[in-house]
Image: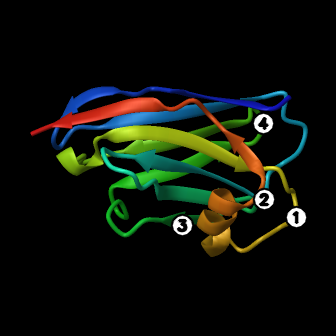
Amino acid sequence: QVQLEEFGGGSVQAGGSLRLSCSATSITYRPSCMGWFRHPAGPDREGVAAIDSNGAAVYAENVKDRFTISQDTKTNVLYLQMDNMEPEDTAMYYCAAVKSATQVSGDLCFLHLAYDDGYWGQGTQVTVSS
């Protein structure tokens, strides 16, 4: 059973940095898409960053140029480097991976992660104070 577990959440002041990690255990394939979503206060979950199996990344407009997604395919770890953080980045952050290994275009990864059959971590809390 594939399990995703997030690490690295915490509290930081505005302008600071955090690095999230997502460890994928028992995974025996390269997912078409992996990514990060967040759930701030309120009902909606939003995609933050995603990466396809070729390494192409896509970002939400409000984190572009501040966040960087990367993956280590040898250790099955997904990363999210968050720089110049803002109070609006405060949220529970979740790691996700689709079950499919069929190659897709990176710019479709948010849709695949949100709606296709996949795996999700338990989340890690990130709090940014002003």
Tell me, yes or no, whether the two marked residues, 2 and 1, touch with CB atoms within 8 Å.
yes
- Report the residue at 50% width, 50% height from top: 37
Q: Quadrant of residue 2?
A: top right
Circle 4 crowding by C-alpha within 10 Å: few under 14, some 14–19, many from 20: few
Place of residue 125 in the rendered image (x, y in percent of width and height, measured from the top left)? 38, 30
Left or right of 33? Residue 126 is: left
Which of disc 2 and disc 4 is earlier in sequence? 2
Distance between the Cα atoms at labels 3 and 1? 18 Å
Q: What residue is shown with label 3?
A: 58
- Say which amino acid is labelled 3: Val
Callout 2 secondary element = loop
Please rate how many residues cluster around mark 3, counting C-alpha atoms within 10 Å: few if below 14, some from 14 to 19, many from 20.
many
- The amino acid type found where label 1 is placed reads Thr
**Separation of residues labelled 4 and 3 (CA atoms):** 21 Å
Work out how far the residue at label 2 is from the one at label 1, CA to CA, in angstroms: 6 Å
Ranked by sequence position, the earlier of labels 2 and 1 is 2
Q: Nearer the viewer, residue 71 or 63?
A: 63
Instruction: Give the class, few, some or many, for how many residues have Cα within 10 Å of label 1's Cα (few <14, many ≥20).
Output: few
Q: Label 2 belongs to which residue?
A: 32
Badge 2: residue crowd in 10 Å (few <14, some 14–19, many ≥20): many
Where in the figure is residue 3, as x and y percent of width and height? 74, 29
> What amino acid does circle 4 point to?
Lys
Q: CA distance from mark 2 to mark 3?
A: 13 Å
CB within 8 Å, label 4 to label 3: no
Q: Quadrant of the N terminus?
A: top right
Picture quadrant where residue 114 is located: bottom right
